[in-house]
């Protein structure tokens, strides 16, 4: 069975105009849905996708609000951490929280050192963003961290080769597509505030055509990125998504 990974960023008790903020109550209902669908997968959901949960950046709400919900449903998520922000940037987790997540059975991976788009990095910068981030994360956790989430979803052949050289066994993208459990490149669907539960369930049914439609739209977005360039696209992205100060550019 293939898996569709859902990508979250920040949770809040109250909603926000910033699209990458999801209300904690919404997240709880979504996790309850995912748990029920994962249970159904073992009792005959033939042809359906298995839902999985990931977080990018390392926001403190991942620990304070997401973890209790996940524990209540006995669900595991994959948290990708911008390592250079750990314990250094207001609103983001420190090593104590990361170790607690790991001790609670959650998975921890890297999201670069500074959230710099990897396609903009030279060889030395790539080493810092990839190899140094992994080693620092492993040293802080006392455990392996063999997975990487690409900041801004940006990559090319050179970046992927650098990920392999830095010791990563899986790379998580921001492309809305299902992936095999052992895939080298793993697709994800970005979750924004206000997503409808019935729509999310349809996404997990390939026969509905919803996921295929999202993949086509993502390809058009890729064309827009190429035409506009990263700087102009980032400005447009922040405007459309009502991005807040210090929020990293999304996918």
Image (cartoon, helix red, strand yellow):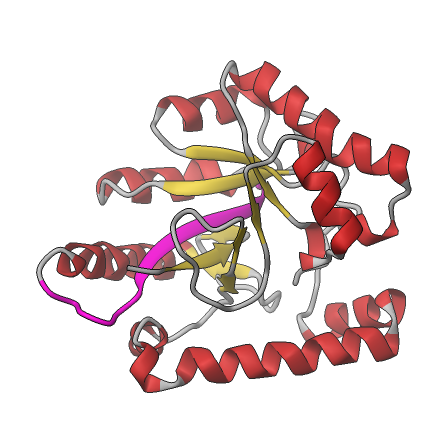
Lateral position of residue 51 relative to residue 12, left or right: left
Above or below, 194 relative to 121: below
* Quarter containing the N terminus: bottom left
Residue 94 position in % (x across, y down): 59, 25
Q: Quadrant of the C terminus?
A: bottom right
Residue name at image x 58 percent, y 20 percent: 138
Q: Locate residue 47, reporting x and y percent.
A: 24, 72
Q: Residue at x 34, y 60 (%)?
A: 2
Task: Residue at 32%, 71% (x, y): give it.
Answer: 204
Q: Is residue 72 left or right of residue 12?
A: left
What range is drawn magenta here?
Answer: 44-59
Q: Residue at x 57, y 66 (%)?
A: 175
User: In the figure, is residue 81 to the left or right of 129?
Assistant: left
Asked if the stretch drawn in magenta spans residue 230, the answer is: no
Instruction: Please provide percent x and percent y for residue 151.
Output: 69, 50
Estimate the x, y position of residue 4 in percent, counting from the top left: 40, 61
185 lies above or below 63: below
């Amino acid at each position: 069975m293939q898996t569709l990974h859902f990508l979250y960023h920040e949770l809040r008790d109250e909603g926000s105009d910033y699209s990458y903020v999801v209300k904690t109550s919404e997240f709880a209902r979504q996790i309850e849905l995912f748990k029920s669908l994962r249970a159904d997968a073992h009792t005959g959901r033939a042809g359906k996708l298995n839902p999985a949960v990931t977080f990018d950046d390392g926001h403190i709400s991942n620990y304070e609000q997401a973890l209790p919900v996940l524990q209540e449903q006995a669900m595991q998520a994959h948290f990708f951490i911008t390592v250079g922000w750990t314990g250094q940037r207001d609103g983001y987790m420190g090593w104590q929280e990361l170790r607690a997540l790991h001790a609670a059975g959650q998975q921890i991976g890297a999201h670069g050192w500074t959230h710099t788009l990897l396609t903009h990095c030279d060889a030395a910068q790539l080493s810092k963003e990839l190899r140094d981030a992994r080693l620092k994360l492993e040293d802080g956790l006392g455990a392996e961290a063999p997975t990487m989430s690409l900041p801004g979803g940006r990559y090319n052949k050179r970046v992927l080769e650098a990920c392999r050289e830095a010791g990563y066994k899986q790379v998580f993208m921001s492309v809305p597509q299902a992936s095999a459990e052992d895939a080298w490149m793993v697709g994800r669907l970005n979750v924004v505030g206000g997503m409808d539960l019935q729509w999310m369930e349809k996404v997990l049914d390939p026969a509905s055509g919803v996921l295929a439609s999202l993949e086509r739209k993502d390809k058009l977005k890729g064309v827009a990125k190429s035409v506009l360039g990263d700087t102009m696209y980032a400005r447009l992205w922040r405007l459309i998504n009502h991005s807040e100060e210090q929020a990293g550019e999304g996918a």
